[in-house]
Image: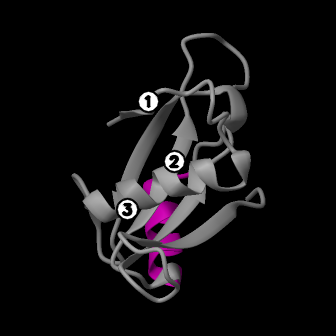
């Protein structure tokens, strides 16, 4: 399995240990992990939700996070995949914008493809 980047982000807060914590995993383009692996990672994170975000492109080839504005997004609890999670979605956007993983000036909005 490739090395993956994880973040723990407190959504709805600007102070550490405030708000709602969520784990966010940035999956590189072209990496397909089985659902069982995604669930095991969520169990290891042991938070209410773990979000998996991956760039999406209509063009073939790798799409780096920094130039993409469309992303696939999935949410897992330690027990199962869930259909939607608000605070993990907010945490995912924060993970993208922190550290300039997306170009702030060129991205007017993010598209999360479910």
Which residue occupies the extreme top position in the image? Answer: 59
Q: Which residues are magenta?
A: 33-44
Quarter of the image where one finds residue 62: top right
How would you classify the magenta stretch by its main secondary structure?
helix
Q: According to the image, label 3 marks what residue?
A: 88
Q: Position of residue 87 (x, y in %)?
A: 32, 64
Dot 1 and dot 3 residues touching (CB under 8 Å): no
Identify the residue at image location x=47%, y=89%.
17
Q: CA distance from mark 1 to mark 3?
A: 17 Å
Colour mapping: one colour
Q: Is residue 113 above or below residue 15?
A: above
Label 1 neighbour load within 10 Å: few <14, some 14-19, many 20+? few
Label 2 neighbour load within 10 Å: few <14, some 14-19, many 20+? many
Which residue occupies the extreme bottom position in the image? Answer: 17
Q: Mark 2 against mark 1, which lies toward the viewer?
A: 1
Q: According to the image, label 1 marks what residue?
A: 109
Q: Position of residue 5 (x, y in %)?
A: 70, 61
Which circle's residue, 2 or 1, is located before the other in the chain?
A: 2
Which circle's residue, 2 or 3, is located before the other in the chain?
A: 2
Which circle's residue, 1 or 3, is located before the other in the chain?
A: 3
**Element assignment for label 2:** strand
Q: Is residue 97 above or below residue 106?
A: below
Identify the residue at image location x=62%, y=36%.
104
Identify the residue at image location x=29%, y=68%.
80
Q: According to the image, label 2 marks what residue?
A: 53
In the rendered image, the quadrant that contains the C terminus is top left
Query: 78 left or right of 64?
Result: left
């Amino acid at each position: 399995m490739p090395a993956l980047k994880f973040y723990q982000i407190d959504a709805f807060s600007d102070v550490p240990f405030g708000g709602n914590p969520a784990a966010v995993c940035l999956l590189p383009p072209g990496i397909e992990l089985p659902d069982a692996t995604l669930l095991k990672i969520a169990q290891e994170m042991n938070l209410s939700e773990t979000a998996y975000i991956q760039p999406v492109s209509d063009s073939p080839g790798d799409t780096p996070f920094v130039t993409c504005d469309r992303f696939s997004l999935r949410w897992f609890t330690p027990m199962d995949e869930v259909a939607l999670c608000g605070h993990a979605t907010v945490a995912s956007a924060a993970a993208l914008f922190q550290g300039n993983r997306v170009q702030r000036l060129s991205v007017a909005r993010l598209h999360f493809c479910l």
